[in-house]
Amino acid sequence: MRTIRRCSQFASVGAIVALCATTAHATTIQELVRIKGHEHNVITGMGLVIGLNGTGDDSRQALIAARPYGELLRNYGNAALSVAELAEADAYAIVQVTMELPATGVREGDRLNVYVDTMFNATSLAGGRLVVSPLRLPLPDSNELMPMAFATGSVIIQGDNPRSGIVRNGGQMLTDVRTSPITAAGTMGLVLKDQYASYPVATTIAAAINDEFALDGMDRIAIVEDAKTIKVLVPAEERRDPAEFIATLVTISIDPSLIRTEARIVINEREGIIVVTGNVEISPVGITHKGLSISPITPRIAGGGLPGFPGAGQGQGRGSLRRWTGLDTTGRQSRNSTRLLDLLSAFDQLMVPVDDQIAIIYELKKTGALHAEIVGE
């Protein structure tokens, strides 16, 4: 396996940070794709959380919330005469219960976390316990639709929202859920993860698969269907027991330098974070913003002054205080462009607030000078 050098850089809260791995091994296909047919599924149900200290549903304001509670009492052999009798109850809450099944499937008896969310006007689930609740696929009522799991246990509040909680290992499967990636035609699909979905990456992965299995006499078993999907023909002798073939397939090594993804910027405005891939470039452009100026050419004049900005890079001009810096365009693939990382470094040099950095990046995108996809969070 070839040793490679990888470097990625990002800016966070106005600072530029470089992360470099001097020795790193090639990645594998399983880190770039998921196997079609191995998807997460959700089963759900309606449940009751009891034992609340006056923070449950107010039946006087939402009588519909009292009906499931009345049904619970009836099942326990203590039926209420009318919904009005439950009007003062506030120690219970009607909740939606959901459980996510792993993409690789589950077996009878497996225990998983379940999540509960209030459905009516309960103010907090803290201290409550989920009554045994059946879970099934989120489909309309049917007598033939049997529960796939049940859930029960103490509710733990996570985060700042007391109306939602988790029951750790509170769900138990009543049946198996098996997933088979092999179709009747003997093929399987590899679906590229969103951050890698592109024809260049799909083509690279398909070529690596074909090269790997060509040694065994299997010719062109991988075909790129689109920018996100690769179809793989499973050899006939492997279809009955494909585990070894799939294990070999997904652990094929890919040189990260061959993963040519599009330039991308991820911006989290709430946290003030900017994450930039190293291949984001900017066409020649001048920026003036709140007293600062940035251009792609560094002017040189006698005495160290700057044209239009007498004195040093930051100083008092004739009319107003201006801040100036330049972006180096030499040593790039094109002398007519510069990297966004250089611009972020200039921002850091001029102590530009991260909110202003984000605003400038969006404006650069509008002008067409910024050659990258922006992903906002």
Image (cartoon, rainbow, N blue to C red):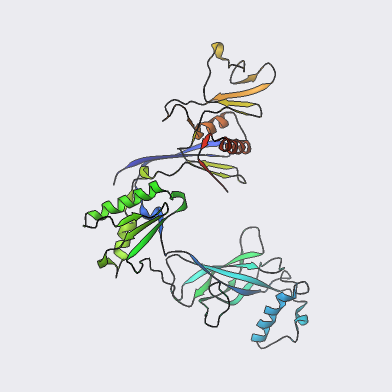
Q: Is residue 28 left or right of residue 16?
A: left
Q: Is residue 228 left or right of residue 298?
A: left
Q: Is residue 205 left or right of residue 163?
A: left
Task: Answer above or below: position of 196 versus 161.
Answer: above
Q: Residue furthest top?
A: 302
Q: Residue furthest bottom?
A: 77
Task: Answer above or below: position of 345 versus 142.
Answer: above
Q: Is residue 154 left or right of residue 238?
A: right
* Count of numbered circles on the image: 0
Q: Position of residue 304 (x, y in %)?
A: 55, 14
Residue 320 picture quarter: top right
Q: Nearer the viewer, residue 158 or 41?
A: 41
Q: Position of residue 97 (x, y in %)?
A: 59, 70
Q: Position of residue 362 (x, y in %)?
A: 59, 39
Measuring 44% from the left and 25% from the top, which residue is drawn there?
Answer: 330
Q: Nearer the viewer, residue 237 or 94?
A: 237
Q: Nearer the viewer, residue 259 or 271?
A: 259
Measuring 72% from the left and 75% from the top, which residue is drawn there?
Answer: 64
Task: Answer above or below: position of 215 versus 370.
Answer: below
Task: Answer above or below: position of 7 versus 204.
Answer: above
Q: Position of residue 370 (x, y in %)?
A: 53, 36
